[in-house]
Image (cartoon, rainbow, N blue to C red):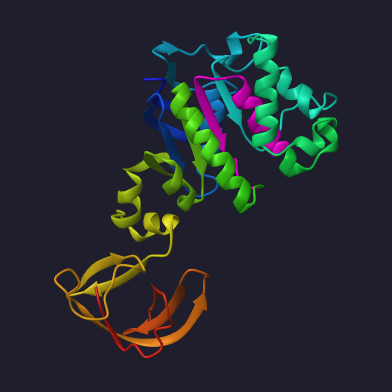
Amino acid sequence: MVLKVEQVQFSYTVGKPVFSNVSFYVRPGEIVSIVGPSGTGKSTLLKCIAGYLSLEEGKVLIEGEEMIDPKHLLKMGHPEIALVDQLFELDDYFTVKENIYNQLHHLDLATRNSFVAELIGVFELEEVAHLQSKDISGGEKQRLTMACALAKEPKCLLLDEPFVHFDVHLHKKIGDYLKKLVEVRQMAVLLVTHNGTEALAWSKRILMMKNGKMQSKYTPEQAYFKPKSLYEGRFFGELNSVYIQQKQRLFRPIEYALTQTDIYQNEIEVTFLNADFKGPYFANYFKIKGGKEIVLYSLEKLKNTHKIYV
């Protein structure tokens, strides 16, 4: 086990824990996501794991060794943990290239130069490589921060909403690179996000956090198709809720049929409202008995549909 978190608790104000009784682990080569609403303690938890805040209770272990409380250290943080957040802790007066280069003193000169060039290329920082980091944009600082974290070759990588400044192209490119690096280096990665669809694509396991507590644990498939509640399910995409024989039924917009089948047997009368074009599909919105709305995905508009089966 690379990272193990045992019964941790932290408070900014005595008697008001930001989170408590939190336990989980991350294996080598594994990406685990923590998903939940803003203000539930996700970012604070990462800072505690990274060694920037002192825990009230519990402990954090890296490869079986308990981390020392930050207040007993001359420099906060753990050498085998890299944290990427929105603070962009860079050396402002070093260039982009120098910021990355300064993380690689553990490598020989040739390997160092090669790795710097690789990271600058992957993170598309070629045009600003010669600029001081204080003079680049927020999105470029985000990419540089992640490049510096990977240059350290940490055993554990903590990512706090790392893709908020990335366009679709960069998200895919950097995501693919990071996933390969995680597998090759057998890093443990902990991703914090409120974007559940991002967690589905990245994670082997997903932890749901609410009000400072770990509420649920899922595989990506379970989180999408078998959420424990409407509240949790909606973090991972649009989700319909209907009542059949006084029992709630949750289903995704792709989980239906226009004719009765062995899988979809419960008939629901629907009234077409409108359809939004989403590119590869239409999102068709309907009203059902009681006035509630549901959404169904299809390759065409379903304006002539009057009943479905779930």
Rendered view: 309 above or below 138: below
Rendered view: 169 above or below 123: below
Judge whether residue 158 is colored magenta: yes
**In this picture, residue 270 sits left or right of residue 141:** left
Where residue 271 appears, as percent x and y from the top left, is 37, 88
User: Could you tell me which residue is drawn at 75 percent across and 23 percent down?
Assistant: 99
Residue 49 visible from this viewpoint = yes
User: Could you tell me which residue is drawn at 85 percent across and 36 percent down?
Assistant: 135
Judge whether residue 242 is colored magenta: no
What's the magenta region?
141-164
Rendered view: 215 above or below 240: above
Where residue 257 appears, as percent x and y from the top left, is 26, 75
Residue furthest left in the image: 262
Residue 41 visible from this viewpoint = no
Where residue 276 appears, as percent x and y from the top left, is 51, 77
- Quadrant (top left/top right/bottom left/bottom right) for the C terminus: bottom left
Q: Which quadrant of the structure image shows residue 265? A: bottom left
**In this picture, residue 21 sits left or right of residue 91:** left
Q: Nearer the viewer, residue 217 or 174?
A: 174
User: Could you tell me which residue is drawn at 72 percent across and 43 percent down?
Assistant: 139
**In this picture, residue 136 sits left or right of residue 161:** right
- Quadrant (top left/top right/bottom left/bottom right) for the N terminus: top left
**In this picture, residue 309 sits left or right of residue 115:** left
Q: Nearer the viewer, residue 73 or 104?
A: 104
